[in-house]
Image (cartoon, rainbow, N blue to C red):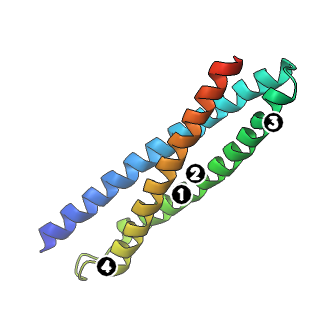
Amino acid sequence: HMQTKVLYLSDLKFNLETWKRELRFHFNEMDTFEEKLEEIASREFGQKALKPLEIFQNRIMIEKDAISKLLHRIRNKMININRVNFDESIDGRLQNEQHTLREDMKNYIKLHYELKEEMMDYFLEWL
């Protein structure tokens, strides 16, 4: 039983570390995309280019905010895992939280790749 718990928690840690790396990468990627958008903005293509550009800038801000919140939740979860008392039964709260975090990560990833794809199309058109 103790063994199961240790394995469960190390799997959990692995997931959290993986998500953390992925989120940090996406955050930097969004910085790069912001720079590209600014490059397009400076070229004065007019409204046709600027309208979607402003929307993208907004969506990037929202995404970066979402990333920060997810990273914060991952940090808290790590603290909880490192504090777990192995004499207790597997902490239900930890599992429930993990589930919602996993769901939220799934949704976030879906939205991230949708945004990325739309921006890549936009860059093909204007860069």
User: Please, what is the three-letter code of the amino acid marked with disc 2?
Assistant: Ile
Q: Between marks 1 and 4, how big is the CA–CA gap?
A: 21 Å
Identify the element where label 3 is drawn: helix
Q: Earlier in the sequence, mark 1 or mark 4?
A: 1
Identify residue for label 2: 67
**Depicted 52 relative to depicted 4: above or below:** above
On the picture, is 50 further left or further right than 4?
Answer: right
Identify the element where label 4 is drawn: loop
The answer to whether mark 3 and mark 1 are in CB contact below 8 A is no
Q: At x 75% / y 42%, what residue is drawn? A: 55
The answer to whether mark 1 and mark 4 are in CB contact below 8 A is no
Q: Which numbered circle lies on residue 91?
A: 4
The answer to whether mark 3 and mark 4 are in CB contact below 8 A is no
Q: At x 65% / y 23%, what residue is drawn? A: 123
Identify residue for label 3: 51
- Report the number of discs: 4
User: Please, what is the three-letter code of the amino acid marked with disc 4?
Assistant: Asp
Which of the two residues, 70 or 5, is positioned nearer the viewer here? 70
